[in-house]
Every structure is written in C-alpha cells, then in structure tokens.
C-alpha cells in the first residue's frame, strides 16, 4: 500500500493534476508517496485526488466539448502531431522518467514505450484525416432514399490505465478519443504517474485547448471510481486487471455507458517440433520475460511438443539465467525491478505456490539483491522457469504478471489446443510451426483476440486489439477505436 503523506514537501517533486489547461494541486491538499521500484525509496509525490478533483475535470471537459467536437479534423490533427513531436523531442527525459517510475530497463523505455506513445498520437492524428463513413442507396417499391452514417463524438470520455506500460497505454486511449472529437478525463496508475504528468505539460505546450484533456491523479477506489460513476461521462475505456474490470462493469452497466475493457491474460505459447527452433526459443524467452513479464500479452504458459521438450527447456533456462537483472538505468541490464513491493511479494508467493503444487523450479525462483548501493532495497526477481505442473494447476490458470513461466510437454495438436483454451482468459496466443495448414487450423481454434504465428508482439496499430472471455470486452486499435469513440447516426434522405 502507498501511504498518504500529509507532511510538508520541500525537496521532492510534486506531481500535479492537469485540469482545464492548468497544472493544479489536489483539492484536498493530500499527496501519496511515489516509490522508485529499483531503490524502494520514495522519490516524488502524487496527488491523492478525489471526487472533487474529478468534478473539476468533468466540468472543464464538458465545457470544452462542443468547441473541440466542432473543430475541423485537420486542426485536431495538427495539435496532436505537435504533441507527438514534443514527445520525440523529450524522448530521453521521458524514457528516464518512465524507468525510474516503473523499474523497466531504460533501453526498453527508450526503444518501445516512449516512441510508441508518439506513434499512438500520430497514428490517430492522421487516421481522422482518412476516415470514411458508410452510405446505403435504398430502393423500395414506391420510394427511394439515401442512407448515410454520421460518426459523432460521444462526449467526455473517461480513460483509466495501468502501470505496466504507463505512457504507452495512456496515449493509446487518449489519442483516438481526442482525434474523434471527444474531450477526456484520464487517470494513470497511481504507481506510475510521472510520464502522464510530463505528457500533460507537453499538451499544454503544444496548445491543446483548455479542458480538452484533463489528467486526474490518485487511487482507483477514489479517482477511478469517481470517473466510472460520474453521470456526465458516458464512455469509459479501461485497461487493467480482470477483477477491477468486473467492478467497473457493475457500476457502469446500469448507467448504460459505452465500455471498453482490456483486461488480464495467461497466454499460451505453443511450440511444435517442426518449428524454426532457434527463433522459437529466442522469441519465447523474450515473450516470457520482457518488462519483467509484466505485459498482458506475455507468453507465460509455454507448451512444447514432446520430441523437443528436454532440449527446449535446457536452452530456454540457459538463456533465462543469462538475463542480467540489475539497475534499470544501467544500459547493461536486461531485466529491471518489478513495479512495487506488494507486487514482488505477490509474484514470489505465486512461485511458492508452484513449489507447493509440485512444480520444479528449473531456474530462478528467488528475489535478487542487486549489488549496487543504489538498488540494494529494490524489487528484483530472478527470471523463473517452472516445469512439472499440470496444465490445469493454479500456476497455469492464474495471471502472475511477473518473470515467471511454466513449460509443459504435449503430444498432439488436439490436446494442446484444449489446454491452451482451458483458462478463463483469452487475450493472445503464439504458435510456432513451419506447417502452414496447422498454423491456420490451430489459429482458428484458439479462443483469443490475437494469434501470432512464428512471432510475438508484432504490432500493427491498424489491427483490432483486445480479448475474449475474462480478458475483456470490445476492441481497441485502428478503425475499432475510432468506432468505439463515436456514435453512429443514420440519416435517411428520401427522394423521388
Ligand atoms: P488494476 O486493475 O489494479 O489498475 C488499473 C487502473 O485501474 C489503475 O489506474 C487503478 O488505479 C485503477 N483502478 C483500480 N481500482 C479501480 C476502481 N474500483 N475503479 C476504477 N478504477 C480503478 O491493474 P494494474 O495492476 O494497474 O495492471 C495490471 C493488469 O492490467 C494486469 O491484469 C494486466 O494483464 C492488465 N493489462 C491488460 C492489458 C490489455 O490490453 N488487455 C494491457 C496492460 C495491462
């Protein structure tokens, strides 16, 4: 838990809300500690926002809506492109901020998280210039008509995002909402608020009109819940845990809000014996441990066809041991810290549970005490490989969201597809095979929103992105996001 800090703050940086184009203090004056995961030390303070701050943000967003919605797409596009340029300008500053806040390696923040935030802005800034709508020529026995569809912004959008890919996912929600003419009240995770704050500064610098984007910081139960239950926010986009998604759906459902929920995953990574072996091993290690395994799309359940099982496990574990766990600001580190002390304890608890269930820890399994004065109290965990568990064991069903992977042998295609589908989740899957027929038939039978064949996390921002079952409701990405953030209105014009 993060403790509230009522004491006077003099040295450490205070993050501010961004409401109506101004950086402002929380209404209550209360702040939360913001901890650097690599050191375990408080390094800044984040507003402990509440319903009063959300109300101020909704007021500003409501007031700004009509003008922003009526702003020509070209102008909305231009200001969003300016924001993207400012993200590029501040790449290094934002990447360091992300790494300090989250614990992820600087190389990753610099090459993936921050560039992707700029891409999100550019993608939707230009998508609205090329959008199209539908029209239908109607012919009845005695009348003709032209039906066409207007796609209009919904209103004030609520956007709530998680800590694992902070600026990347924050902008993934905000960009399509703004591009299509909505105004936004957004809440980043209270564990990783820094880059959302820096982003809000860049939006002001870029000249985004007042009230169009409002960023309110604070906890889920206070700020998040106030956004979800606010009567003047008709549309909510949420990315986070499945349990939180269920809470949000319970609140928003009876209010008939438009809802997109991007939730947890427990993704199968299926390796057939006929695969390109070197590529499969190397990519599977990355899929398991990138970002300390804290990616919703992580390939955390590896299934390997029996003829290559022993060889695969040995090589996979060897590569896992070679991953250097260390200070995320050190360019030589492959793995940084997990996001918080609570999360580290949760992940270590899951490893204990796997041991209790008869799992064999092939490598890892322990906390790492990094040998540097700066990081001696940081939240580091060894990349951990576990075998010997049943496909339906707790470890294979629950999302762990840490550097922990299980590897299980299988004997035939039918069996492995059944096991792959046997969790409550359905976000993504990866299949390794050189057999084209098998690739297509297995892809067809997997119950997930995305299937990668012979690759992992190869993202094209135009494709539909989301999950089935308890991995979510609705889709993000490209046209899907543009549709979500607009209401289609049919206009029927009769003529003789
Ligand atoms: P979380 O659900 O704890 O928090 C996500 C956000 O929701 C945070 O901003 C939090 O403050 C807020 N929140 C918490 N309780 C709330 C409530 N009652 N009402 C409104 N908002 C509330 O998730 P997390 O721990 O930050 O993120 C990890 C989870 O996110 C994992 O399960 C992961 O799989 C999932 N995730 C999914 C995707 C995807 O695209 N499907 C992407 C990234 C992460």
Image: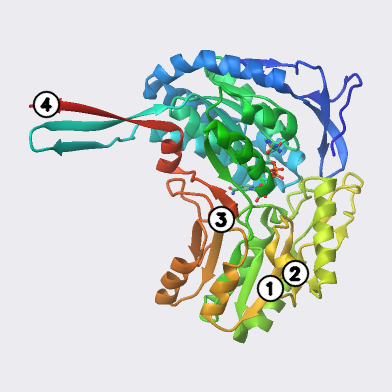
Q: Earlier in the sequence, mark 2 or mark 4?
A: 2
What is the distance, in whole Å, between disc 2 and disc 4 at their CAs? 69 Å
Residue located at (72% from left, 48% from top): 105
- C-alpha separation, residue under disc 2 versus residue under disc 1: 7 Å
Question: Disc 2 marks which residue?
Answer: 385
The reply to whether the C-beta atoms of the residues labelled 4 and 3 are less than 8 Å apart is: no
Residue 254 horizontal side relative to residue 148, left or right = right
The image shows residue 367, relative to residue 102, as above or below, that is: below
**Residue 42 place in picture, x, y as percent:** 86, 34
Q: Please rate how many residues cluster around mark 2, counting C-alpha atoms within 10 Å: few if below 14, some from 14 to 19, many from 20.
A: many
At a point 41% along the width and 70% down the height, the residue shown is: 440
Dividing the picture into quadrants, the one containing residue 496 is: top left
* Disc 3 target residue: 469
Q: How far apart, in angstroms, are the residues tagged by discs 3 and 1?
A: 23 Å
Disc 4 secondary structure class: strand
The secondary structure type at the circle numbered 1 is strand
Q: Residue at x 68, y 47 (%)?
A: 243
Q: Is residue 17 left or right of residue 232?
A: right
In the image, the residue with mark 1 has its CB under 8 Å from the nearest atom of ligand 1: no
Assess whether mark 4 and mark 2 are in contact (beta carbons under 8 angstroms): no
* Residue at the bottom extreme, as displayed: 307
Which numbered disc, 3 or 1, marks the residue that appears first in the sequence? 1
The quadrant in which the N terminus is found is top right
Q: Are marks 2 and 1 in contact (CB under 8 Å)?
A: yes
Side of 373 relative to 59 (left or right): right
């Amino acid at each position: 838990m993060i403790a509230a800090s009522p004491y006077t703050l003099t040295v450490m940086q205070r993050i501010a809300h961004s409401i109506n184009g101004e950086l402002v203090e929380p209404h209550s004056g209360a702040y939360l500690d913001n901890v650097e995961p690599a050191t375990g030390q408080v390094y800044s303070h984040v507003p402990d926002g509440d319903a009063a701050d959300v109300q101020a943000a909704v007021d500003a967003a409501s007031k700004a809506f009509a003008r922003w919605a009526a702003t020509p797409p070209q102008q909305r596009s231009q200001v969003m492109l300016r924001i993207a340029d400012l993200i590029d300008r501040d790449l290094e500053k934002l990447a360091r901020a992300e790494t300090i806040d989250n614990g992820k390696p600087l190389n990753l923040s610099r090459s993936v998280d921050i560039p992707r935030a700029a891409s999100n802005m550019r993608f939707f800034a230009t998508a609205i210039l090329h959008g199209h709508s539908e029209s239908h020529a109607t012919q009845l026995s005695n009348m003709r008509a032209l039906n066409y569809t207007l796609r209009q912004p919904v209103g004030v959008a609520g956007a709530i995002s998680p800590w694992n890919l902070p600026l990347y996912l924050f902008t993934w929600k905000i960009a399509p909402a703004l591009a299509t003419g909505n105004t936004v009240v957004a809440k980043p995770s209270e564990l990783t608020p820094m880059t959302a704050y820096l982003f809000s500064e860049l939006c002001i610098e870029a000249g985004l009109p007042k009230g169009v984007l409002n960023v309110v910081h604070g906890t889920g139960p206070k700020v998040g819940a106030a956004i979800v239950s606010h009567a003047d926010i008709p549309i909510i986009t949420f990315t986070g845990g499945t349990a939180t998604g269920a809470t949000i759906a319970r609140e928003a459902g009876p209010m008939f809000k438009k809802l997109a929920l991007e939730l947890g995953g427990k993704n199968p990574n299926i390796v057939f014996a006929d695969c390109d072996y070197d590529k499969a091993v190397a990519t599977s290690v990355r899929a398991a441990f990138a970002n300390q395994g804290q990616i919703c799309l992580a390939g955390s359940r590896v299934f390997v066809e029996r003829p290559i099982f022993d060889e695969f496990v040995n090589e996979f574990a060897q590569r896992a041991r070679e991953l250097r766990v260390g200070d995320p600001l050190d360019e030589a580190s492959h793995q940084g810290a997990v996001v918080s002390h609570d999360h580290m304890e949760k992940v270590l608890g899951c490893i204990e549970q796997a041991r209790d269930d008869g799992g064999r820890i092939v490598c890892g399994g322990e906390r790492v005490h990094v040998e540097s004065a700066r990081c001696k109290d940081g939240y580091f965990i060894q990349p951990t490989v576990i075998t010997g568990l049943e496909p339906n064991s707790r470890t294979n069903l629950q999302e762990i969201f840490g550097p922990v992977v299980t590897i299980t042998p299988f004997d035939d295609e039918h069996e492995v597809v059944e096991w792959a589908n046997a969790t409550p989740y359905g976000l993504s899957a990866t299949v390794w095979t050189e057999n084209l027929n098998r690739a297509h038939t297995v892809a067809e039978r997997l119950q997930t929103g995305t299937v990668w064949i012979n690759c992992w996390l190869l993202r094209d921002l135009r494709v539909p992105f989301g999950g089935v079952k308890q991995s979510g409701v609705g889709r993000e990405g490209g046209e899907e996001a543009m549709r979500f953030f607009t209401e289609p209105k049919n206009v029927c014009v009769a003529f003789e």
